[in-house]
């Protein structure tokens, strides 16, 4: 099921090369003034004209179909759509020779011969566009909370320009690590079991294509610490801590300090280099090169996606 | 909300020092023969008599209140309870001087003065007991799938005996890394958005007390790989891959290879060493030592918890 | 929350006088050939050109935005939209002088001054259009089950032509009773508690504007019967019964006989006759006449709505 | 799935002749003082010693397993159980010769040979006991709202003593009509689609064994009224109406007037009179008489069930 939320509901739709992509966001109170500039600006950040990102630059023209009147929310479900304009039908037949590392094979396994995998189908990174629209609206409802993501490293380095160029020239691709800080939600939010803040945030982050790991605060490094080093000393009755190894979450519940997490993106699966794969019809091994437009490093475009996605989660948690 | 599942439902209840702990598991078909020995054996693994684990050894006597008749499931909700027998009311007042790194503070922030935080309350590691009961039943329904977890490292080492003794002597605590392999679920399961297999598994794993990170397959290391190294080459039409960097999941959907993930546990928060904390009544800094029974390293007891928790997730996914 | 379903999900959107109405239907398997003629035919039945129905005749041009390719479902969420073309902004100010019996007052109470109540807003009977689209797709998936609704009476009579004309002339409105038969779902479906078949069907039927009562089988009359008259005698081991007072449902679960229910529609609230109401600004009583296009008897248009709505419920139940 | 609620969660468990019945109520805030007398008093009303009700009088001793400490809720899930003490294993074999009108046949169809149908199993009226416990707690949270149900008629009469005796003597059974008034919830609650107040209340009421119809306000009679008679005139800006044909709900949303509904109970299915049924093993018609303890008229015991069930629904709606 492709819907999110307990207190608000977000249902996403669309395929990379279909008619439109979009979503329905339900549970938003009436009277919120939509900041269209914020939406545009966030969509522009996601398009990202940086070197190493795809040359498909959709204009991302958004239509609100319901729930917004004269620039304000009406309290009913907010439906919106963005047409796909610049898709180019592929010459390749990935339904026969699935790309290694890509969801071609798994989508065929799930949906069969009627799967619409062109451009990645419903699993495409393009589907993060509606996520940004919904997340931007969530941010408008919580102006007192900041969501701030940044790229920590690309391909293992923090100055990645040269590596990115060399990798592009080699027809290869890169991953990266992106962090996000949420400042700050009140103490006492989240649930001990099954809806811990880490559970809610991680479930959302693993919906973003390419994410293969997440850690909160000291994360994996905490497994190598002593308790006496790890434990964050509380310094006043409001709950401020000296350190923040636990990332503002204890027992699944917020403690009023910053929430901080890091996400690992695998390298983009589509690469220009020749790769082996199986021909699903003949069961023979063959070679493919993935041409066309794709990101050398999708991670470069993801900070705004993390911010938007985190905002949706926090809105649901606080609603 | 303390409930899990879309196709099956598991609702957990209990506090560490309350009357009973237990749960209701709904959606299990009729006619499953309950393997009581498996439940007992899994509960024994969780109790774990290893050096470095708590001396509170509850007998874990389980009563089935409904849904099981003559050893077989009837198809109606399965309720079960395990009494708390060996709780010792603490002499300490953690509601006034909350333990650093513990959920004392966040539970008070959430529930106020009526919070039952004794022994960790509803956030206690003891609540993983009902999870094991439910997960064991889930495993009985899927005998063709194995769930196999193991400790990778404790305190950063793979031979941790000496470190564990020294840490115990010092009144300190340790974390660890535990991995889990699921062999194997059919290709085509999971959803592209919001219910990716990684989303479902990570949401569950972050419900287990002390987990602060999770990675699938190559995980964080994948962020430093090239696509040409990362991409798993498909070697036949059934989807077998040469490598398994993606951990059997592509685009959120299973590809028929092993699912593999690693989880980071922070060190146990309760330590014997003296620690500073705030007195919530006076707002002054004070020193506390946490005596009583607690694990030096909770991670030691967690492999069976990961296996059970993963089984619940996979059952929900396949139901 | 304006979403339906446990196993399939249907989220509806739109306002009577907004940009578009539509929905997202998720959980439909891939490979279903969409019978566009059935959708068109069902939408035409709802438009219904009978005397006594509104003169607003939207063309109901439907666009599929996702989830359908080359006429077949792809397995991903099916989004569709129908533009509102023929709405006429009202000259009346029902936000000041709410219509008696209408949802003007309650929508203002719920959404405040940003409510979009024009034409009934999100509560309009027009929102049954997306319900028909989704229900028609549901029917395509269950060709072996028939959903057959018919008008039992209008204004208390079974030959209502004359009454309808007289009521129209008087500027008044009528209600009616509509029945629906579902032939036939397998025995053993439904849940004893909270998801009985009656629960699921009634929850859906009370979403249809104007419904104020529902009864299954002998319904209210059964309250006046003896058990020896009411009990349906089972005549063979497949569960066939001599009578069907229980409407094919016992203990919330289907018994394999026809499911039959009757629904009561109150008279349309918009009437041409002069009515008193309060002016919400001055708190004074005033008189209003509701001009413009509206149904004298909405019930006339509802059989296809009941069939579609029932099909969605049964699909969710059988999925 | 046997769980209820969007904002609160109630999961019910138990079989009529099993170990215990009970439930888990989650989402109740901390600090509510449990009024144990109210629970006892409501359970006593359900046991109901009136002539015409079953002679099985369970003591209804309730144990709170979690979520309550020193008489106050702690904010975590409230689990409770009531043992079954007075069940008598039946001499009859209703799994072979299912009682007409009873859920024997449908439970066997659903659960197969492992079904526990003794005493009605999970579908027994006894399962309304945990509903009363949960509903009583819900009432404690909303002391400003009254839930008041009463028997309108039994077997079609309002003075039913004589009819009840005669029916008992004849080994037959009776149904009845019970009404419930909710005074009063604020205007603006409920949703236009899929979660109208009528939807939520009817779904719950049809979970109560034996309910076959529900109507709100003028209900079925409204189908025979003119709009000019039906429409409730609003007499002041707070939304007070002159009449209350719509039962306080317009467009699915509350208008601040009393909510009123009537529920039809079919006659109890278990009767002493000889009845024909099929032998599921031989497919031959046979005669059975249902002896043992059962209600001649279950409706007599239901007012407190309706009040409790309605309270749960309203709590979920207002949470």
Image (spheres, coloured by chain):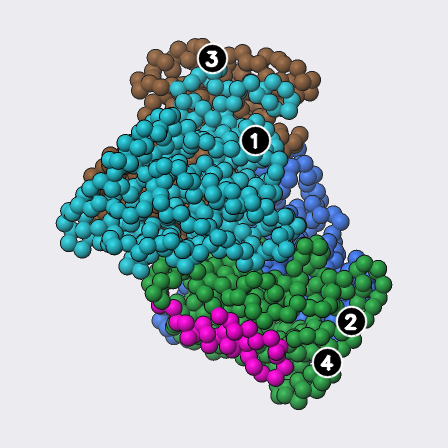
Chain colours: A brown, B cyan, C blue, D green
Secondary structure category for the residue under label 1: strand
> Which residues, given as a range, are shown in magenta?
D32-61
Instruction: Confirm whether the magenta stretch covers residue A132.
Output: no
> Can residue B95 be seen at all in this image of the molecule?
no
Q: Residue at x 56, y 62 (%)?
A: D19
Q: In the figure, is residue A249 to the left or right of B249?
A: left
Q: Are marks 2 and 4 on the same chain?
A: yes
Q: Chain of mark 1?
A: B
Instruction: Confirm whether the magenta stretch covers residue D54.
Output: yes
User: Where residue B260 sits: x, y (%)?
Assistant: 49, 29
Q: Are marks 1 and 3 on the same chain?
A: no
Comparing B232 with D220, the one in front is: B232
Chief secondary structure of the magenta portion = loop
Q: Residue at x 70, y 45 (%)?
A: C140
User: Where residue B305 sits: x, y (%)?
Assistant: 46, 40
Q: Chain of mark 2?
A: D
Using the numbered discs, state the Cα–Cα distance from disc 1 to disc 4 in whole angstroms.
60 Å
The residue pinned by badge 3 equals A171
Q: Is residue D80 above or below residue D180?
A: above
User: Where residue A146 sits: x, y (%)?
Assistant: 29, 40
Label 4 Cα crowd, 10 Å radius (few <14 / some 14-19 / many 20+): some
Secondary structure category for the residue under label 4: loop
Q: Is residue C306 above or below residue D84?
A: above
The residue pinned by badge 1 equals B183
Q: In the figure, is residue B16 to the left or right of A12?
A: left
Secondary structure category for the residue under label 3: loop
Using the numbered discs, state the Cα–Cα distance from disc 2 to disc 3 in whole angstroms.
80 Å
The residue pinned by badge 2 equals D288
The residue pinned by badge 4 equals D171
């Amino acid at each position: 099921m492709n819907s999110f939320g307990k207190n608000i509901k977000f249902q996403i739709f669309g395929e990379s090369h279909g008619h439109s992509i979009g979503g329905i966001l339900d549970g938003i109170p009436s009277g919120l003034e939509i900041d269209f500039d914020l939406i545009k600006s966030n969509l522009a950040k996601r398009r990202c004209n940086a070197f190493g990102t795809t040359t498909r630059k959709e204009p991302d023209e958004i239509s609100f179909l319901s729930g917004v009147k004269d620039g304000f929310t009406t309290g009913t479900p907010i439906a919106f759509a963005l047409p796909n304009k610049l898709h180019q039908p592929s010459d390749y037949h990935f339904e026969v020779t699935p790309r290694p590392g890509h969801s071609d094979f798994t989508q065929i396994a799930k949906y069969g011969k009627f799967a619409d995998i062109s451009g990645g189908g419903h699993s495409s990174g393009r589907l993060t566009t509606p996520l940004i629209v919904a997340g931007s609206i969530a941010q408008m409802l919580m102006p007192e909370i900041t969501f701030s993501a940044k790229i920590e490293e690309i391909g293992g380095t923090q100055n990645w320009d040269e590596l990115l160029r060399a990798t592009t020239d080699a027809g290869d691709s890169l991953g990266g690590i992106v962090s996000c800080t949420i400042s700050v939600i009140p103490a006492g939010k989240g649930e001990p079991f099954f809806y811990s803040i880490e559970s809610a945030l991680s479930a959302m982050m693993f919906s973003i294509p390419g994410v293969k790991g997440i850690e909160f605060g000291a994360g994996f490094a905490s497994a190598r610490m002593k308790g006496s080093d790890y434990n964050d000393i509380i310094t006043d009755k409001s709950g401020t801590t000296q350190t923040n190894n636990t990332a503002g979450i204890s027992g699944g519940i917020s403690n009023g300090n910053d929430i901080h997490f890091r996400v690992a993106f695998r390298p983009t699966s589509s690469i220009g280099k020749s790769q082996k794969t199986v021909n699903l019809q003949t069961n023979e091994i063959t070679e493919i090169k993935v041409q066309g437009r794709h990101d050398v490093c999708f991670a470069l475009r993801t900070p705004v996606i993390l911010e938007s996605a985190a905002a949706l989660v926090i809105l649901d948690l606080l609603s």
